[in-house]
Amino acid sequence: AQRYLPWFRVANAEASAVITVRQLLNHTSGLAVGAGRDQEHDTLEGHVRGLSEVTLVHAPGERHEYSSANYLVLGHIVEVLSGQSFGAYVEEHIFAPLDMKHSFASQEAAQETGVMASGYQYWLSYPRATTLSHESDRLPTAALIASAEDMAHFMIAQLDEGRYQETAVLSPESMAEMHRPTAESEGFSYAMGWRVSETEGVAEIFHGGIVPNFRGQMVMLPGLETGVVVLTNVSSVMGTPTSHRMAATVAALLGDTPPPAHSNMTLTLLHGFIAFGVLMITFNQIKDLVRVRRWAEKLPRPPFSTPMLLRKIVLPIALEILIPLLLLFGLPRWLGFSWAEMIRQMPDIAYWLMLASALGLLIAFLKGRLALSVFNSGEIA
């Protein structure tokens, strides 16, 4: 990669020097699944430069681990070599020759046509129309906009050695190399931007995409010269996306193979259970808030023994503080999301977590204040 971006680096300088373009394409560079996700930048170059603080999870070339950050680096290499923005390059060298007339690198341009669907996000089981700012700074990873018909043009080129009608966007040799699996993973092999697997002798080449209010999945059966693409205008970070379930089932029908097993838990039902759990937890928190004075009235009066003080006052209040702090600081770190990204990806859960944390800290404050009053005077102020 440093051949094209001499300044490119990750936290380990030695590893930075040996990461190759092929490893970025195969997702064997060592970049973790959430690498750079918690960083805020306005440009593609900014995102790539931000990887200088990222620690690799394994040595380059050692194994496959999917990471969108690989595409960020590759996309900026395209920009440097072409002298164009990544979006402009895609429009000129992919959309135009493949006659993808309803495909865009700009959300504003797509909306001006009047044909772009509104995206939706789930808010505690209810799909709500949501228009989000376009991730133009992360186009190599997601957020290109296309119709189902245009995606069919794209798949035809993938299945016909890089050609659509009389136009070639890639040589047959390059297309074959793109589809050649080289990195083993769990349940599939990874080629260059494509997952490859086989079901009862039928080869499948597939990949999906996600932004917070849209989902998509493509499955191609090269041996049968056919494929399917499913685009949905609703998205959730939880459960199996409808686009993926539908595409896999249709592909199985086309290939005359057994349809994949899917959970009977639909996204609506899953979000319904989550909504119920959220409401029950909030109800219990409000009940604790209302009864906090009653809790104080049951506290033992001084003099306190140390074990009693710890068991009856210190530990309960410490727990009330610890849980909100874990939610506010530990959960984003564990998920690899910043709070801004959590709000963008799952606003209902993110805002509820904030509310639950605020209620928890308020209850801890009130309990602490009342317990201090009991400790000092034996009475509730």
Image: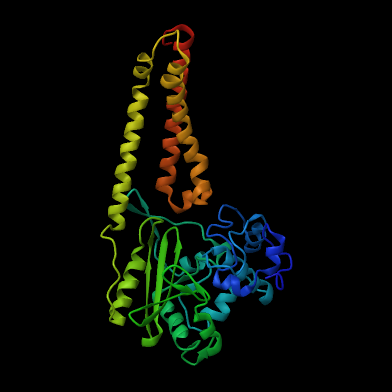
Figure check: 328 above or below 199 = above
Image location of residue 99, percent across then percent down: 48, 83
Q: Is residue 272 left or right of residue 159?
A: left
Q: State left or right for residue 12 relative to residue 255.
A: right
User: Residue at the spot x=35%, y=35% of the render?
Assistant: 282
Indicate whether 362 appears above or below 349: above
Q: Is residue 334 left or right of residue 74?
A: left
* Residue 256, quarter of the rendered image: bottom left
Q: How many marks can you see?
A: 0
Q: Position of residue 6 (x, y in %)?
A: 74, 68
In the image shown, does 304 or 212 lie closer to the viewer? 304
Q: How is the image coloured?
A: rainbow
Picture quarter with the C terminus: top left
- Can see residue 115? no
Identified at 36% across, 31% down, the residue is 285
Q: Quadrant of the N terminus?
A: bottom right
Residue furthest to the right in view is 6
Where does the image place residue 356, in percent across and percent down from the top left? 41, 36
Q: Is residue 359 above or below residue 141?
A: above
Q: Is residue 303 above or below residue 210?
A: above
